[in-house]
Amino acid sequence: MADALVSPKDAPNPPAPEQRVVVANKHGDKLAGMLHHGGSNKAVVLCHGFAAWDDSIMIDLASALTNQGISAFRFDFSGNGESEGEFQYGNYRKEADDLHSVVSYLSQEKYDVTAIVGHSKGGSVVVLYASIYGDVPMIVNLSGRFYLEKGVEERLGKEFMDRINKEGYIDVTNKSGKVLYRVTKESLMERLNTDMHAASLSISKECRFFTIHGSADKIIPVEDAYEFARLIPNHKLHVIKRANHGYTSHRKQLCGAVIDCITSNEAGSTPP
């Protein structure tokens, strides 16, 4: 995997359509990424969801963006996929910091990072990012979770707090009993103590913010999207009817909605 990134401005020949890139985060972990060249210095950063580094949504969005002449950069958060670091259940703040390392790196390489897009957990991360850093003019939240206290019981079981207080961790297994990952008390509390209400209120009105959500999402209900819409100042909500959490049968509509957001002049100019 290449450590250097050739910017379109300095390249003697047109760059390859896709290029593997490594970006170091502030903890020294190497983040594995893929740059999809769109033929210009405008770039959009794509953020995967929980343990979803090999994400077809991000691949489809990268293709849709490059077809519009916009470069796309998708990467694995630390502890995920090919990136270094320890996988953690929570890690919202660290993933926001990972994202900042990526944005800073692309900016140093003369890319104009016009937007960041995050799906599911990545959607919550981009909300947090906007509240902390505020250095990217547009945020697109795809099916992000507002109520971070919800969804935990479904993954960890009804008595998760008693178990984690007793043991200090919970091992999440598949049906055959194989351990998929370990949830520590620290990482669980980091999730439960991340305040999306406060984060939403602290996002600058100069930031153009879009939320896209499926009306048939059973993983993260569309009600979460309405909370983001209620609290974030410069916000536009687009609900895709009958779409599920992964937009399985609505991928074309999702990509079209994201492109509309990114190519629009203002948050209010996209279709409802």
Image (cartoon, rainbow, N blue to C red):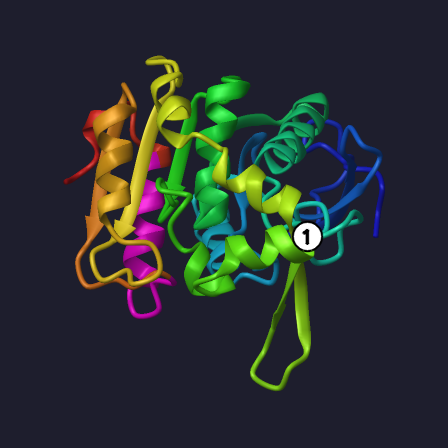
Residue 171 in sight here = yes
Residue drawn at the location 42% of the way across and 43% of the way down:
148
Q: Position of residue 224 (x, y in %)?
A: 28, 43
Judged left or right of residue 89, residue 115 is left
Note whether 93 is above or below 167 in the view shown: above
Judged left or right of residue 256, residue 92 is right
Q: Nearer the viewer, residue 267 or 181?
A: 181
Residue neighbourhood size for the residue with mark 1, other residues' Cα within 10 Å, grouped as few (<14), some (14–19), many (≥20): few
Note whether 129 is above or below 58 in the view shown: above
Residue drawn at the location 44% of the way across and 31% of the way down:
127
Residue at the spot of label 1: 168
Residue 117 forms part of the magenta stretch? no
Q: Position of residue 97 (x, y in %)?
A: 65, 30
Residue 249 forms part of the magenta stretch? yes
Q: Nearer the viewer, residue 197 or 102?
A: 197
Q: Nearer the viewer, residue 55 or 162?
A: 162
Q: Residue furthest bottom?
A: 176
Q: Quadrant of the C terminus?
A: top left
Q: Position of residue 15 (x, y in %)?
A: 71, 44
Q: Nearer the viewer, residue 155 or 61?
A: 155
> Which residues, given as a range, are shown in magenta?
246-261
Image quadrant assignment for residue 96? top right
**Secondary element type, mark 1:** loop
Q: Residue furthest left?
A: 272
Image quadrant assignment for residue 181? bottom right
Residue 72 in sight here = no
Note whether 120 is above or below 155 in the view shown: above
Q: Position of residue 33 (x, y in %)?
A: 70, 47
Image quadrant assignment for residue 215? bottom left
Residue drawn at the location 62% of the way across and 86% of the way down:
176
Amino acid on which the number 1 mark rests in the picture: Gly
